[in-house]
Image (cartoon, grey):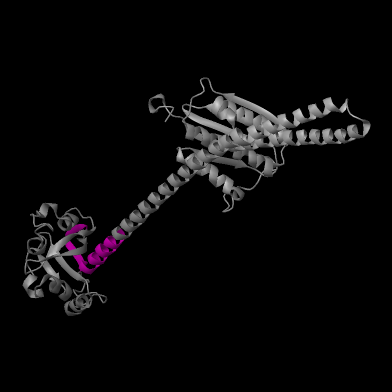
Amino acid sequence: MPVTALGEPPATALPPKAAQLLLDSTGEGIFGVDMDGHCMFINRAGAGMLGWEAAQVLGRNMHELTHHSHADGSPYPDSECPIFNAFRRGLPCRLDTEVFWRRDGSAFPVEYSSHPVIDDGQVRGAVITFVDITERRRAAEALQRAKAELEERVAERTRELSEALARQRELAAYSDTVREEERTRIAREVHDELGSLLVALKMDVNWLDKRLSEQQRREPEAAQEMRDRMRCKCQNMSRLIENAVGNVGRIITDLRPSILDHQGLWAALEWQAHEFVQSAELDLDWDMRLACPPELPETMAMAVFRIFQEMLSNVGRHAQASRVTVRIADEAGVLCMAVADDGQGAPAEAFEAATAYGVMGMRERAGHFGGQIAIASEAGRGTCFTLRMPLPTASSGAGE
């Protein structure tokens, strides 16, 4: 202890008993060692955590007493001990990954810090403080277990949701397939049955009109007037039948465009675009760049066609546009189909609304084949729908 020139302790120094009382008043373990690692002092809490009386520890090598082994029981040389290295090199340290050993041979996890004691520029030893972190470690382990269980439950729920979504998409794809098959069947039946009946009926009406015209010249004037009226009725019926035939053809086309079966997807897309702009009285900018148009599986081709129809339908219902631009290209094995208009546009949330069934339908159709729908829209500057869908490779088989 430093002294004054008169050999008296400074006024601020504590007497040994007071210093010991101060050390014993804390719940943390505190001990001091000299350069050889021998204990110079230890407080009651520290000795108690180690299972010793304070007097039994004094003068003993603290590394050999309480820090001699790792947690797994393997030897812990004092040359590797951070406590000793701290005062040998004059550097403090703090660790919470090691254990101290009790008198009964049991170990407990500790957090300890070691600070060198320096006097006149010389390291004289070190002061070590430590606390038993058994409860903290248990709490951390319990928290880690709870976290792991939560992550497992979240992962399990995520898997369940993913599987449910996959099943939903499969069901939606199956429903689309069944619906298309039903449309094809109805279109064929309407064409074969109703179309044929209307054509036969028109032929019969025309035959009746012709016969009435032939007999009219050989009958008196009164009878001729009646036949004129009958001929007028026949001609009206013929016009109505022609309208019915046209409507039946339109219904068949809406159900299943015959061009899709006879000339393929790419011709059907161009035909649909021209039909749409003619009906909506819009200008069309058509650009299809497919050096070698791939043949898509029927279900995939129908999905692309229905997505294209929905894109055009959105333009007709909402855009108030004057021009439609269609771009179709093969970009490194990915079909890129964009439909843009110069209409009024819409905010992004309009396309994410719960009632945006058309957009949801397009995304579901595209997602079933690994595709995506991107939408770019700005108020007053139009909207652009873009489909990006991987094209089947030659090895996968185009007709699957």
Query: Does residue 347 show up magenta in the picture?
Result: no
Bounds of the magenta segment: 121-147
Q: Quadrant of residue 194?
A: top right
Q: Which residue ends up furthest to the right in the rendered image?
A: 221
Image side of residue 116 versus residue 392, left or right: left
| Image coords of residue 246 (percent x, y) | 70, 34
Q: Residue 331, image x and y in percent?
A: 50, 27
Q: Residue at the spot x=36%, y=53% of the render? A: 160
Q: Is residue 263 visible?
A: no
Q: Work out which quarter of the rendered image holds the C terminus and state it.
A: top left
- Given residues 292 and 144, the one toward you in this image is 292
The answer to whether 325 appears left or right of 9 in the picture is right
Q: Is residue 356 above or below residue 258?
A: below
Q: Nearer the viewer, residue 368 or 180?
A: 180
* Closest to the observer, 159 or 377: 159
Residue 102, position in %: x, y?
10, 68
Q: Is residue 337 above or below residue 103?
A: above
Q: Is residue 146 magenta?
A: yes
User: What residue is drawn where x is 75% and y is 32%?
Assistant: 205
The quarter holding residue 95 reads bottom left
- Looking at the image, the residue that sits furthest to the top is 291
Q: Is residue 61 left or right of residue 333?
A: left
Position of 238 relative to 167 (above/below): above
Corner quadrant of residue 75: bottom left
Q: Is residue 150 visible?
A: yes
